[in-house]
Image: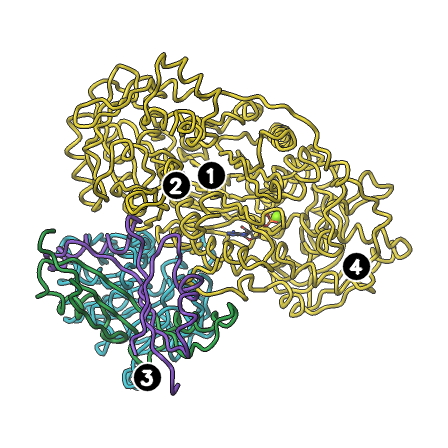
Chain colours: A cyan, B yellow, C green, D purple
Amino acid sequence: MRIGVTVFPGSNCDRDAMHAVERAGATPVELWHADPELKGVDAVVVPGGFSYGDYLRPGAIARFAKVMGPLEEFAKSGGPVLGVCNGFQVLLEAHLLPGALLRNTGMRFVSRRARTRVEKADTPWTALYGEGEEITLPVAHNEGNYYADEGTIRELEEEGRIVLRYLDNPNGSANDIAGICNEARNVVGLMPHPERVSDPALGSEEGLRVFESVLAAAGAKV
Amino acid sequence: MSIQETYASLGLSDYEYDRILELMGRAPNYLELSLFSVMWSEHCGYKNSRPLLRRFPNTGPRVLQGPGENAGVIEVGEGWALAFKMESHNHPSAVEPYEGAATGVGGIIRDVIAMGARPVALLNALRFGPLDDERNRYLFREVVRGIGGYGNAIGVPTVGGEVEFSPAYSGNPLVNAMCVGIIRADEVVRAKAEAGEGNLVVLFGAKTGRDGIHGATFASDELTEESEAKRSNVQVGDPFAGKMLIECSLRLLERNLLVALQDLGAAGIASSASEMAARGEVGIEIDAEKVPLREEGMEAWEVVISESQERMLAVVEPEKADEVLKVCERYELDAAVVGRVTSHGELRVLDNGEPIGSVPAQYLADAPVYEREVQRPSYLDEAQRFDPDDLPLPDDYNEVLLRMLAHPSLCSRASVYEQYDSEVGSDTVVRPGADAAVMRIKGTKLGFAVTADVSGRHCYLDPRGGGAAAVAEAYRNLSCVGAEPVAITDCLNFGSPEKPDGYYGLSECVDGMAEACEVLGTPVVSGNVSLFNETERGAIYPTPAVGMVGVFEDVSRHATPGFKREGDMVVVLGGIPRWPREGHPLSGSSYLEVIEGKVAGRPIVPDLAAEKEAADLVRTMIRSGLIDTAHDVSEGGTLVAFAEMALAGGIGFDFAAREIERFADDKRHLQEILLGEKGATFVVTVPQNRWPELQEALSGANIGYDDTGYTGGDRFVVPGLIDLSLEDLRRARERDLFEQHAPEGGHLG
Amino acid sequence: MTNAMKVRVLVRPKRGILDPQGEAVKRALPALGFSGVETVHIGRLIEMEVESADEVEGMCRRLLANPTTEEYEWEVVS
Amino acid sequence: MTNAMKVRVLVRPKRGILDPQGEAVKRALPALGFSGVETVHIGRLIEMEVESADEVEGMCRRLLANPTTEEYEWEVVS
Ligand SMILES: Nc1ncnc2c1ncn2[C@@H]1O[C@H](COP(=O)(O)OP(=O)(O)O)[C@@H](O)[C@H]1O
Ligand SMILES: [Mg+2]
């Protein structure tokens, strides 16, 4: 399986995402922001970082990058897409997911481990977790405070589209939301960084199954 | 302005100006004078410190590059090497803390890139005045935000550092940043403009503006609209451009497109070009009009000494220039051929073909050297006077421990390092909070550890001992995590060397450090000097920050300070202080400062041989897998070390009653055991069934040790003296150092 | 540059949306001795020189403001 | 709230000081399909309701703007 990893100017978790993809047993493929093609990949990860310096608003400029056109089509046709941290912000700005991420209520960058609960295992990126399973993932962000209007939040709750929830909310996020998916469930945005805990050498592999899930999901389809 | 006023405003002395006249055989013009002024500054020319720096050992079996390049380089193994350096940004941070700190981080990252290395770890050593002052709080908050703002965005993890507060730094904060980069040993790039004549000079990165041009000349002008517009600007960092610069530089090197590479620091193009020329023994010509500009109407001299951030200078073979420009375009960076390498040996600036200044690069590289008078300062006798027997005995150890743990210089640093991304890059094995950060090298079993240390208080009370102690502490910290210490970088933060007091501190600290480096086998491979750190209230404490790097053959064999299991034996290795005492472990201690409000006494002079023996033993035991839990005893003594280990592991501690009973009648000795700071001491734990193995491992060594208690439960107990829950300890120690601070967006200075 | 027009765009958090920055500033004011501030909201100021104002509305809608959380207004200032 | 006045503060990077945000946005615009933008500068918009305007100048100087890198202007809007 080939998994694309987008690289915008200022992306900085792209290499980490590729490393996790490799560890999961897939082949990472760099998708350069200025090239309007997905090179035939089977899934796409939009990694974290500070695309375009986070200037203006995180993700606001990146969503216009040339690679985003084909990526949006891919997402709409059911292709598995995962946005992590800044990648989540990009997917929100691109309206592939609803809502927005505001400044952390503490007004500080927050970098630490967050305890979370996997709420839904019926997405291609969480298939290998148990529903209700608690995992500890790193967070590192300035704008991770998920916001959407009441109607949207209700919808997300009712449709089971909150994929990951904080057990110790680090940023003020509505309903402790750490990750959501779209209606079709193929597009997932996560604020925490599963790729950073995908290697036993770093003391934890709790995030690796995110990447293994998409392989398993693809395998199931074949 | 008279000529004398002009050179004085550029920071040149009469003597230096005469020297320039003599060298040049004519009067220099303003541009040339500017070149001398920056190249002969302490920052670039080390005119006050060069003879002192020669005292440092700088070679060793793993040293690939010692001082003199943009960063030092050491060998790790399997062809991997590490480039690292520490640098100060004290003055800019005092003026504009956010940008000062941010550009400090950016600058040190570029030094590492210039060696061809990929930056993989950042550290910082910080000093501020006490937090009860609004300005100090503002500086602290903004410096930390600036470090995070830059490091987080550029995607290099900030994995360690240190922060302390003391009135000695009020108004003169210290902001030292360190960067470690990784590189293949055979691909180290040197900033030499070799391959001589005909090669081109390419400037790439951000556009050039009037940033940081020595505003001195305008300072005395009347402020008119025009002079205001021309005034030098505060330097602002752009981590986004910085990130592009890293990727672009590494891509250029990977594709073998560069002959030499150099970052732009103080005095911008002029100093980088002259350094390259001097090192390569060639000349360089710069066409000022070819430099991409951000502002209109800049004069040629401004262009070549501007300190705009996020720029690099490269020497390129002519046939590769187009390819270089194309790569820069891919990373959306400005790039232009701005000059060429020549054989005339001069740094020559041209404006549309007209030479507007020309100086032999060697002259610029050859700053005058001052050997200052060394005189023992009078404050020392007074400060060292301390009779431990006058010290009150604590009547409530519970309160003592809680107060110590809550003190801003001893409490948890989490509120600082949780503002830093410490994991981006996916190489961080041990995150901030331990004695040293541990990093792996992907695709290998190798790893490295890195720490930054110094005690200003110790250096103030005994400069030579304090200098040695800083190196020894770094050595301990690396050994505690299991790394083999290899080499150091340093940043010498001192007051004025023109005052004998100040020069004494500098000279003594350097001697102490040099001796420690010698004995411990950790040469100095890079560093930086920051002098004149003084306010009207006097000089800062002598503060030689030490950044030490160590290596692992197998990074999975490392240790951390947190207790791991219930029922482990807790052993003090190096032993608790014995009587009759050889020195006073409470002299100059944290206890004395925190509880008694005194900075006094002469701290115990480090026993370097003992430091080495104990640390090496700890490392050997970690490597062999015998221990996985270790912490050194430093600020706050064993009591604080035990408490930190209990909190880090979330497991309680019970001091063995018999140990306490032994000293029941000797309360002074007990106080020294619990709170003294004597160096060369570690706390380790072993499962009880491996205690014989530990004793066996220690049997041949000339090191005292005491089994002082057991891990377990959720209380911290020293029988008859302390009985606190871990929750009590946590509440005291885990304080938010920023809690009463104003929010972002604001100035509030 | 000759016939460029200056445009000023103000982007502010939508009413009712959490504004952590504004809140933080409001909380800090009393400590500095400033009283009588009832609300504080913090947004973005964007100033541009453009050849024509035709595209400004589109830029605001698509790029400069996030319609989920922000509202904007713009004007030609010279 | 009854007799509160609304004050608008505009804070912008000082002239000549690098404005990385503005630069990056300007550089990105053509690729996003927006042409004809010659300069972009990004600053802060602060809107407050205050009981009196007497202290606004002081707030700007001490908290709302950083005098080293930013300039500000303010006005009462209602
Ligand atoms: N300014 C800082 N930035 C990042 N990490 C820091 C900073 N200050 C302290 N730390 C981290 O906090 C921990 C405790 O620091 P310190 O008390 O100085 O340790 P030690 O006494 O072992 O040298 C270390 O892991 C250190 O790296
Ligand atoms: Mg330590």
* Numbered tag placed on residue B656 in the rendering: 4
Instruction: Using the image, determine if residue B499 lies above or below residue B667.
Output: above
Provide residue B619's location: percent of width, then percent of height: 61, 42
First reached walking from the N terminus: tag 2 or tag 1 = 1
Residue holding disc 3: A157
Chain holding disc 2: B
Structural distance between the alpha carbons of marks 4 and 1: 45 Å
Is the residue marked by circle 4 packed among few (<14), some (14-19), or many (20+) residues within 10 Å? Answer: some
Callout 4, which amino acid?
Answer: Ala
Residue B620 shows in this picture: no
C-beta proximity under 8 Å, tags 3 and 4: no
First reached walking from the N terminus: tag 2 or tag 4 = 2
Provide residue A194's location: percent of width, then percent of height: 37, 62
- Secondary structure of the residue carrying tag 2 is helix
Instruction: Using the image, determine if residue B693 lies above or below residue D35.
Output: above
* Numbered tag placed on residue B507 in the rendering: none
Callout 2, which amino acid?
Answer: Gly
C-beta proximity under 8 Å, tags 3 and 1: no
Beta carbon at label 2 within 8 Å of ligand 1: no
Given residues B160 and B303, the one toward you in this image is B303
Q: Do the residues indicated by labels 3 and 1 lie within the same chain of the protein?
A: no
- Secondary structure of the residue carrying tag 1 is strand
Residue holding disc 1: B87
First reached walking from the N terminus: tag 4 or tag 1 = 1
Residue holding disc 2: B107
Chain holding disc 1: B
C-beta proximity under 8 Å, tags 2 and 4: no
Q: Do the residues indicated by labels 2 and 4 lie within the same chain of the protein?
A: yes
Q: Quadrant of the C terminus of chain A?
A: bottom left
